[in-house]
Amino acid sequence: MMDKLIIPCIYLKEGKAKTGFEASDDFELSDPVSLARRYGNEGADAVLVFDFSKGDAAHEEAIGTIREICAAAETPVIAAGNIRRMEDVKKLIYAGCRKTVLNFEKESNRELLEEVSKKFGKEKMVIYLPSADYYNRYKERVESYAGRLLCAPEVQEQLVNKTKLPFLVLEDGADAFAALSKDGVFAVTGLSLCRENFMDLKARCIKAGIPVNTFQSKIAWAEFQLNSDGLIPVVVQDYQTDEVLMLAYMNEEAFNTTLTTGKMTYWSRSRQELWTKGLTSGHLQYVKTLALDCDKDTILAKVSQIGAACHTGNRSCFFQELIRKEYDDTNPLRVFQRVYDIISDRKLHPKDGSYTNYLFDKGIDKILKKVGEESTEIVIAAKNPDKEEIKYEISDFLYHVMVLMVEKGVTWEEITRELAHR
Protein backbone atom coordinates (compact mmCIF):
# COMPACT_ATOMS: atom_id res chain seq x y z
CA MET A 1 0.00 0.00 0.00
CA MET A 2 1.27 3.46 -0.92
CA ASP A 3 2.37 5.71 1.97
CA LYS A 4 0.07 8.67 2.54
CA LEU A 5 1.74 12.06 2.47
CA ILE A 6 1.61 15.18 4.63
CA ILE A 7 2.12 18.34 2.56
CA PRO A 8 1.98 21.75 4.31
CA CYS A 9 1.27 24.89 2.28
CA ILE A 10 3.14 28.13 1.82
CA TYR A 11 0.98 31.00 0.55
CA LEU A 12 3.51 33.18 -1.23
CA LYS A 13 2.65 36.84 -1.57
CA GLU A 14 5.10 39.69 -2.20
CA GLY A 15 8.00 37.45 -1.24
CA LYS A 16 6.50 36.54 2.14
CA ALA A 17 4.75 33.47 3.53
CA LYS A 18 1.21 34.50 4.47
CA THR A 19 -1.70 32.83 6.23
CA GLY A 20 -3.87 33.42 3.19
CA PHE A 21 -4.34 35.54 0.11
CA GLU A 22 -7.30 37.64 1.19
CA ALA A 23 -6.68 41.00 2.84
CA SER A 24 -8.28 39.80 6.07
CA ASP A 25 -5.84 36.85 6.22
CA ASP A 26 -2.76 38.85 5.34
CA PHE A 27 -0.74 37.83 8.39
CA GLU A 28 2.91 37.07 7.78
CA LEU A 29 4.17 33.68 8.98
CA SER A 30 7.87 33.66 8.17
CA ASP A 31 10.48 33.95 5.47
CA PRO A 32 9.19 31.36 2.95
CA VAL A 33 12.62 29.84 2.27
CA SER A 34 13.34 29.29 5.97
CA LEU A 35 9.82 27.96 6.44
CA ALA A 36 10.23 25.45 3.61
CA ARG A 37 13.55 24.27 5.04
CA ARG A 38 11.94 23.81 8.45
CA TYR A 39 9.00 21.88 7.01
CA GLY A 40 11.34 19.58 5.09
CA ASN A 41 13.45 18.89 8.17
CA GLU A 42 10.50 18.37 10.48
CA GLY A 43 8.90 15.54 8.55
CA ALA A 44 6.83 17.07 5.74
CA ASP A 45 6.75 14.82 2.69
CA ALA A 46 6.50 17.74 0.27
CA VAL A 47 5.68 21.45 0.29
CA LEU A 48 2.87 23.04 -1.73
CA VAL A 49 3.57 26.66 -2.70
CA PHE A 50 0.69 28.87 -3.82
CA ASP A 51 1.90 31.91 -5.78
CA PHE A 52 -0.53 34.80 -5.34
CA SER A 53 1.59 37.44 -7.06
CA LYS A 54 -0.05 39.95 -9.39
CA GLY A 55 1.51 41.03 -12.65
CA ASP A 56 4.35 39.59 -14.70
CA ALA A 57 7.15 41.30 -12.74
CA ALA A 58 5.85 40.03 -9.41
CA HIS A 59 5.36 36.58 -10.91
CA GLU A 60 8.99 36.46 -12.04
CA GLU A 61 10.09 37.45 -8.54
CA ALA A 62 7.88 34.71 -7.10
CA ILE A 63 9.47 32.11 -9.38
CA GLY A 64 12.86 33.26 -8.09
CA THR A 65 11.66 32.72 -4.52
CA ILE A 66 10.24 29.31 -5.46
CA ARG A 67 13.65 28.40 -6.89
CA GLU A 68 15.20 29.24 -3.50
CA ILE A 69 12.48 27.21 -1.76
CA CYS A 70 13.25 24.18 -3.94
CA ALA A 71 16.92 24.45 -3.03
CA ALA A 72 16.24 24.78 0.69
CA ALA A 73 13.29 22.47 1.33
CA GLU A 74 15.14 19.11 1.12
CA THR A 75 11.78 17.68 0.10
CA PRO A 76 9.75 17.86 -3.15
CA VAL A 77 8.03 21.16 -3.96
CA ILE A 78 4.68 21.45 -5.75
CA ALA A 79 3.85 24.82 -7.34
CA ALA A 80 0.35 26.24 -7.69
CA GLY A 81 -1.18 29.59 -8.56
CA ASN A 82 -0.54 32.06 -11.37
CA ILE A 83 -0.03 29.35 -13.99
CA ARG A 84 -1.49 30.51 -17.28
CA ARG A 85 0.73 29.27 -20.08
CA MET A 86 3.34 26.69 -21.07
CA GLU A 87 6.15 29.08 -20.16
CA ASP A 88 4.92 29.29 -16.54
CA VAL A 89 5.01 25.50 -16.18
CA LYS A 90 8.45 25.31 -17.80
CA LYS A 91 9.92 27.95 -15.50
CA LEU A 92 8.54 26.23 -12.40
CA ILE A 93 9.81 22.79 -13.46
CA TYR A 94 13.21 24.31 -14.28
CA ALA A 95 13.17 26.08 -10.90
CA GLY A 96 13.12 22.63 -9.29
CA CYS A 97 9.41 21.94 -8.70
CA ARG A 98 8.49 18.26 -8.92
CA LYS A 99 4.89 18.99 -9.86
CA THR A 100 2.70 21.92 -10.91
CA VAL A 101 -1.00 22.49 -10.24
CA LEU A 102 -3.36 23.58 -13.01
CA ASN A 103 -6.56 25.20 -11.77
CA PHE A 104 -9.31 23.67 -13.90
CA GLU A 105 -11.62 26.56 -13.10
CA LYS A 106 -9.59 28.48 -15.68
CA GLU A 107 -10.44 27.61 -19.28
CA SER A 108 -6.86 28.37 -20.36
CA ASN A 109 -5.56 25.68 -17.99
CA ARG A 110 -8.04 23.14 -19.29
CA GLU A 111 -6.69 23.80 -22.77
CA LEU A 112 -3.08 23.79 -21.52
CA LEU A 113 -3.12 20.39 -19.78
CA GLU A 114 -2.55 18.14 -22.79
CA GLU A 115 0.36 20.23 -24.10
CA VAL A 116 2.29 20.45 -20.81
CA SER A 117 1.56 16.84 -19.91
CA LYS A 118 3.05 15.61 -23.18
CA LYS A 119 6.11 17.81 -22.75
CA PHE A 120 6.89 17.28 -19.06
CA GLY A 121 5.04 14.05 -18.22
CA LYS A 122 1.63 13.45 -16.67
CA GLU A 123 3.24 12.55 -13.32
CA LYS A 124 4.17 16.23 -12.95
CA MET A 125 0.59 17.43 -13.53
CA VAL A 126 -1.79 18.00 -10.61
CA ILE A 127 -5.31 19.22 -11.42
CA TYR A 128 -7.22 21.42 -8.98
CA LEU A 129 -10.95 20.67 -9.15
CA PRO A 130 -13.14 23.33 -7.50
CA SER A 131 -16.11 20.97 -7.84
CA ALA A 132 -16.85 17.42 -8.99
CA ASP A 133 -18.55 18.87 -12.07
CA TYR A 134 -15.16 19.80 -13.58
CA TYR A 135 -14.06 16.17 -13.42
CA ASN A 136 -17.35 14.91 -14.86
CA ARG A 137 -17.16 17.35 -17.79
CA TYR A 138 -13.47 16.80 -18.59
CA LYS A 139 -13.01 13.22 -17.37
CA GLU A 140 -11.24 11.89 -20.48
CA ARG A 141 -8.77 14.79 -20.53
CA VAL A 142 -8.04 14.53 -16.82
CA GLU A 143 -7.55 10.76 -16.87
CA SER A 144 -5.30 10.94 -19.93
CA TYR A 145 -3.03 13.79 -18.91
CA ALA A 146 -3.09 14.29 -15.12
CA GLY A 147 -1.20 12.41 -12.42
CA ARG A 148 -2.91 13.73 -9.28
CA LEU A 149 -6.08 15.56 -8.26
CA LEU A 150 -6.25 18.40 -5.73
CA CYS A 151 -9.61 19.24 -4.23
CA ALA A 152 -11.60 19.91 -1.08
CA PRO A 153 -12.79 16.95 1.08
CA GLU A 154 -16.37 17.12 -0.16
CA VAL A 155 -15.24 16.97 -3.80
CA GLN A 156 -13.01 13.97 -3.05
CA GLU A 157 -15.92 12.15 -1.43
CA GLN A 158 -18.01 12.63 -4.58
CA LEU A 159 -15.26 11.37 -6.89
CA VAL A 160 -13.56 8.63 -4.86
CA ASN A 161 -15.32 5.81 -6.74
CA LYS A 162 -15.05 7.45 -10.16
CA THR A 163 -11.29 7.62 -10.62
CA LYS A 164 -8.12 5.78 -9.64
CA LEU A 165 -6.08 8.99 -9.67
CA PRO A 166 -4.66 9.80 -6.21
CA PHE A 167 -6.23 12.70 -4.32
CA LEU A 168 -4.44 15.52 -2.53
CA VAL A 169 -7.12 16.77 -0.15
CA LEU A 170 -6.99 20.47 0.71
CA GLU A 171 -7.88 20.81 4.38
CA ASP A 172 -8.25 24.32 5.76
CA GLY A 173 -8.47 24.08 9.53
CA ALA A 174 -9.90 20.55 9.57
CA ASP A 175 -8.45 17.41 11.08
CA ALA A 176 -5.62 16.10 8.90
CA PHE A 177 -5.70 12.75 10.70
CA ALA A 178 -9.36 12.24 9.76
CA ALA A 179 -8.61 13.11 6.13
CA LEU A 180 -5.68 10.68 5.94
CA SER A 181 -7.86 7.87 7.29
CA LYS A 182 -10.21 8.09 4.29
CA ASP A 183 -10.01 5.68 1.36
CA GLY A 184 -8.62 7.22 -1.81
CA VAL A 185 -6.80 10.06 -0.05
CA PHE A 186 -3.17 9.96 -1.17
CA ALA A 187 -2.09 13.12 0.65
CA VAL A 188 -3.45 15.87 2.84
CA THR A 189 -2.40 19.46 2.33
CA GLY A 190 -3.36 22.91 3.57
CA LEU A 191 -2.16 25.71 5.79
CA SER A 192 -3.67 24.02 8.87
CA LEU A 193 -0.86 21.45 8.71
CA CYS A 194 1.65 24.18 9.57
CA ARG A 195 0.26 24.21 13.10
CA GLU A 196 0.80 20.49 13.65
CA ASN A 197 3.90 18.53 14.55
CA PHE A 198 4.29 16.35 11.47
CA MET A 199 6.14 13.54 13.25
CA ASP A 200 3.48 13.42 16.00
CA LEU A 201 0.79 13.25 13.34
CA LYS A 202 2.64 10.42 11.60
CA ALA A 203 2.99 8.55 14.89
CA ARG A 204 -0.79 8.76 15.33
CA CYS A 205 -1.26 7.44 11.80
CA ILE A 206 1.08 4.48 12.34
CA LYS A 207 -0.74 3.60 15.56
CA ALA A 208 -4.03 3.63 13.67
CA GLY A 209 -2.65 1.49 10.85
CA ILE A 210 -2.51 4.34 8.31
CA PRO A 211 0.62 3.94 6.14
CA VAL A 212 2.77 7.08 6.20
CA ASN A 213 6.37 7.87 5.37
CA THR A 214 8.16 7.73 8.71
CA PHE A 215 11.19 6.13 10.37
CA GLN A 216 10.80 2.46 11.26
CA SER A 217 13.90 0.36 11.77
CA LYS A 218 14.20 -2.77 9.64
CA ILE A 219 16.35 -4.38 12.37
CA ALA A 220 15.15 -4.62 15.98
CA TRP A 221 17.19 -3.04 18.76
CA ALA A 222 17.46 -6.48 20.38
CA GLU A 223 19.69 -7.59 17.49
CA PHE A 224 22.19 -4.75 17.96
CA GLN A 225 25.56 -5.68 19.49
CA LEU A 226 26.00 -3.22 22.37
CA ASN A 227 29.14 -2.30 24.30
CA SER A 228 29.64 -3.04 28.01
CA ASP A 229 27.59 0.06 28.90
CA GLY A 230 24.61 -1.09 26.85
CA LEU A 231 25.28 1.57 24.21
CA ILE A 232 26.00 1.60 20.49
CA PRO A 233 28.37 4.14 18.87
CA VAL A 234 26.97 6.36 16.14
CA VAL A 235 29.17 7.86 13.42
CA VAL A 236 27.46 10.97 12.01
CA GLN A 237 27.95 12.23 8.44
CA ASP A 238 26.63 15.17 6.45
CA TYR A 239 24.18 13.57 4.01
CA GLN A 240 25.21 15.79 1.10
CA THR A 241 29.00 15.87 1.41
CA ASP A 242 29.68 12.66 3.42
CA GLU A 243 31.85 14.75 5.77
CA VAL A 244 32.20 12.97 9.13
CA LEU A 245 30.75 15.34 11.73
CA MET A 246 30.93 13.60 15.09
CA LEU A 247 30.78 10.40 17.12
CA ALA A 248 28.18 9.83 19.83
CA TYR A 249 26.33 6.97 21.56
CA MET A 250 22.76 5.75 21.76
CA ASN A 251 20.84 3.58 24.16
CA GLU A 252 17.47 2.07 23.23
CA GLU A 253 15.53 5.13 24.40
CA ALA A 254 17.74 7.47 22.36
CA PHE A 255 17.36 5.26 19.29
CA ASN A 256 13.57 5.13 19.59
CA THR A 257 13.35 8.88 20.24
CA THR A 258 15.41 9.49 17.09
CA LEU A 259 12.99 7.38 15.05
CA THR A 260 9.95 9.07 16.55
CA THR A 261 11.08 12.70 16.25
CA GLY A 262 13.36 12.54 13.21
CA LYS A 263 16.00 14.43 15.22
CA MET A 264 19.27 12.77 16.25
CA THR A 265 19.06 11.95 19.95
CA TYR A 266 21.88 10.40 21.99
CA TRP A 267 22.77 9.17 25.46
CA SER A 268 25.22 11.46 27.25
CA ARG A 269 27.77 9.31 29.04
CA SER A 270 29.09 12.25 31.07
CA ARG A 271 25.68 13.57 32.20
CA GLN A 272 23.95 10.18 32.19
CA GLU A 273 20.91 11.56 30.40
CA LEU A 274 19.18 11.66 27.06
CA TRP A 275 20.04 14.63 24.81
CA THR A 276 18.71 15.76 21.46
CA LYS A 277 21.56 17.31 19.52
CA GLY A 278 21.08 21.06 19.12
CA LEU A 279 17.97 21.36 21.28
CA THR A 280 19.48 24.29 23.20
CA SER A 281 21.95 25.62 20.60
CA GLY A 282 19.65 25.29 17.57
CA HIS A 283 22.28 23.15 15.81
CA LEU A 284 19.89 20.29 15.24
CA GLN A 285 20.60 17.16 13.23
CA TYR A 286 17.70 15.92 11.11
CA VAL A 287 17.79 12.23 10.15
CA LYS A 288 18.20 11.29 6.51
CA THR A 289 19.35 7.65 6.83
CA LEU A 290 20.51 5.24 9.54
CA ALA A 291 22.53 2.14 8.67
CA LEU A 292 23.98 -0.69 10.76
CA ASP A 293 27.42 -2.11 10.06
CA CYS A 294 28.15 -5.79 9.31
CA ASP A 295 28.82 -6.66 12.97
CA LYS A 296 25.70 -4.79 14.08
CA ASP A 297 27.77 -2.85 16.62
CA THR A 298 27.97 0.62 14.99
CA ILE A 299 25.37 2.92 13.42
CA LEU A 300 26.16 5.23 10.52
CA ALA A 301 23.84 8.25 10.48
CA LYS A 302 23.53 10.63 7.55
CA VAL A 303 21.97 13.89 8.66
CA SER A 304 21.00 17.38 7.62
CA GLN A 305 23.16 19.41 9.99
CA ILE A 306 21.97 22.84 11.06
CA GLY A 307 24.96 24.98 12.01
CA ALA A 308 27.98 23.39 13.66
CA ALA A 309 28.19 19.79 14.85
CA CYS A 310 31.05 20.48 17.28
CA HIS A 311 30.64 22.32 20.61
CA THR A 312 33.74 24.37 19.65
CA GLY A 313 31.80 25.95 16.79
CA ASN A 314 33.58 23.93 14.12
CA ARG A 315 31.45 22.29 11.47
CA SER A 316 32.97 18.88 12.32
CA CYS A 317 34.46 17.56 15.55
CA PHE A 318 37.34 16.12 13.47
CA PHE A 319 39.25 19.33 12.76
CA GLN A 320 42.57 18.63 14.50
CA GLU A 321 44.87 17.16 11.87
CA LEU A 322 47.47 14.70 13.17
CA ILE A 323 49.32 13.57 10.03
CA ARG A 324 48.93 14.05 6.29
CA LYS A 325 50.27 12.23 3.26
CA GLU A 326 49.77 14.12 0.02
CA TYR A 327 47.44 12.41 -2.46
CA ASP A 328 45.27 13.28 -5.43
CA ASP A 329 41.64 13.62 -4.42
CA THR A 330 39.78 12.28 -7.47
CA ASN A 331 36.28 12.39 -5.97
CA PRO A 332 34.39 13.84 -8.96
CA LEU A 333 32.24 16.37 -7.16
CA ARG A 334 35.07 17.58 -4.93
CA VAL A 335 37.36 18.01 -7.95
CA PHE A 336 34.66 19.88 -9.88
CA GLN A 337 33.96 22.08 -6.87
CA ARG A 338 37.66 22.80 -6.28
CA VAL A 339 38.22 23.85 -9.91
CA TYR A 340 35.00 25.88 -9.83
CA ASP A 341 36.18 27.66 -6.67
CA ILE A 342 39.53 28.52 -8.29
CA ILE A 343 37.73 29.94 -11.33
CA SER A 344 35.41 31.94 -9.04
CA ASP A 345 38.42 33.30 -7.16
CA ARG A 346 40.05 34.37 -10.43
CA LYS A 347 36.93 36.37 -11.28
CA LEU A 348 36.97 38.09 -7.88
CA HIS A 349 40.77 38.45 -7.65
CA PRO A 350 42.24 38.72 -11.16
CA LYS A 351 45.77 37.43 -11.70
CA ASP A 352 48.15 38.72 -14.37
CA GLY A 353 48.68 36.22 -17.17
CA SER A 354 45.70 34.07 -16.13
CA TYR A 355 43.91 32.44 -19.07
CA THR A 356 40.75 32.34 -16.96
CA ASN A 357 40.91 36.12 -16.48
CA TYR A 358 41.53 36.51 -20.21
CA LEU A 359 38.21 34.75 -20.86
CA PHE A 360 36.35 36.84 -18.29
CA ASP A 361 37.85 40.04 -19.72
CA LYS A 362 36.76 39.11 -23.26
CA GLY A 363 33.23 38.48 -22.06
CA ILE A 364 30.38 36.06 -22.64
CA ASP A 365 30.74 35.82 -26.43
CA LYS A 366 34.35 34.64 -26.15
CA ILE A 367 33.42 32.13 -23.44
CA LEU A 368 30.59 30.75 -25.56
CA LYS A 369 32.87 30.53 -28.59
CA LYS A 370 35.35 28.44 -26.59
CA VAL A 371 32.59 26.16 -25.26
CA GLY A 372 31.43 25.57 -28.83
CA GLU A 373 34.97 24.92 -30.07
CA GLU A 374 35.70 22.45 -27.27
CA SER A 375 32.45 20.55 -27.85
CA THR A 376 33.44 20.16 -31.51
CA GLU A 377 36.85 18.88 -30.40
CA ILE A 378 35.08 16.19 -28.38
CA VAL A 379 33.17 15.06 -31.47
CA ILE A 380 36.41 14.84 -33.47
CA ALA A 381 38.26 13.03 -30.65
CA ALA A 382 35.43 10.51 -30.29
CA LYS A 383 36.18 9.26 -33.81
CA ASN A 384 39.68 8.30 -32.63
CA PRO A 385 39.93 4.78 -31.15
CA ASP A 386 42.40 6.04 -28.50
CA LYS A 387 40.39 7.22 -25.46
CA GLU A 388 43.25 9.41 -24.18
CA GLU A 389 42.43 12.17 -26.64
CA ILE A 390 38.74 12.26 -25.72
CA LYS A 391 39.63 12.41 -21.99
CA TYR A 392 41.76 15.47 -22.70
CA GLU A 393 39.08 17.17 -24.80
CA ILE A 394 36.29 16.47 -22.30
CA SER A 395 38.46 17.98 -19.55
CA ASP A 396 39.00 21.10 -21.68
CA PHE A 397 35.27 21.30 -22.36
CA LEU A 398 34.34 20.95 -18.69
CA TYR A 399 36.80 23.67 -17.70
CA HIS A 400 35.28 26.11 -20.20
CA VAL A 401 31.77 25.12 -19.11
CA MET A 402 32.76 25.95 -15.52
CA VAL A 403 33.99 29.37 -16.66
CA LEU A 404 30.57 29.82 -18.25
CA MET A 405 28.87 28.64 -15.04
CA VAL A 406 30.80 31.18 -12.94
CA GLU A 407 30.07 33.94 -15.46
CA LYS A 408 26.33 33.16 -15.30
CA GLY A 409 26.22 32.44 -11.55
CA VAL A 410 25.31 28.75 -11.87
CA THR A 411 26.70 26.44 -9.16
CA TRP A 412 27.51 22.74 -9.20
CA GLU A 413 24.94 22.23 -6.46
CA GLU A 414 22.25 23.61 -8.78
CA ILE A 415 23.42 21.33 -11.59
CA THR A 416 23.55 18.19 -9.44
CA ARG A 417 20.16 18.99 -7.94
CA GLU A 418 18.70 19.30 -11.43
CA LEU A 419 20.27 15.99 -12.50
CA ALA A 420 18.99 14.29 -9.34
CA HIS A 421 15.43 15.33 -10.22
CA ARG A 422 15.58 13.78 -13.70
Image: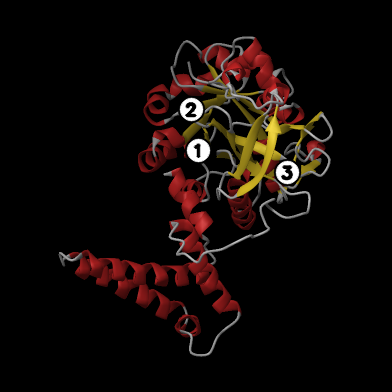
* Place of residue 110 in the rendered image (x, y in percent of width and height, measured from the top left): 46, 34
Dots 1, 2 in contact, CB < 8 A = yes
Three-letter amino acid code at the position of disc 3: Ala
* Place of residue 331 in the rendered image (x, y in percent of width and height, measured from the top left): 45, 57
Residue 268 falls left or right of residue 83: right
Q: Compare marks 3 and 1 and give the one earlier in the sequence.
A: 3
Name of the residue lying farthest toward the bottom: 352
Residue 92 falls left or right of residue 279: left
Q: Is residue 409 above or below residue 231?
A: below
Front residue (pair 401, 372): 401
Residue 190 falls left or right of residue 77: right
Q: Quadrant of residue 261?
A: top right
> Callout 2: helix, strand or loop?
strand
Name of the residue lying farthest toward the front: 228
Three-letter amino acid code at the position of disc 1: Lys
Mark 1 = which residue? 99
> Callout 3: helix, strand or loop?
strand
Front residue (pair 421, 32): 421
Is residue 315 among the parts visible in the rendering?
Answer: yes
Is residue 87 among the parts visible in the rendering?
Answer: no
Q: Is residue 131 above or below residue 326?
A: above
Mark 2 = which residue? 148
Mark 3 = which residue? 17
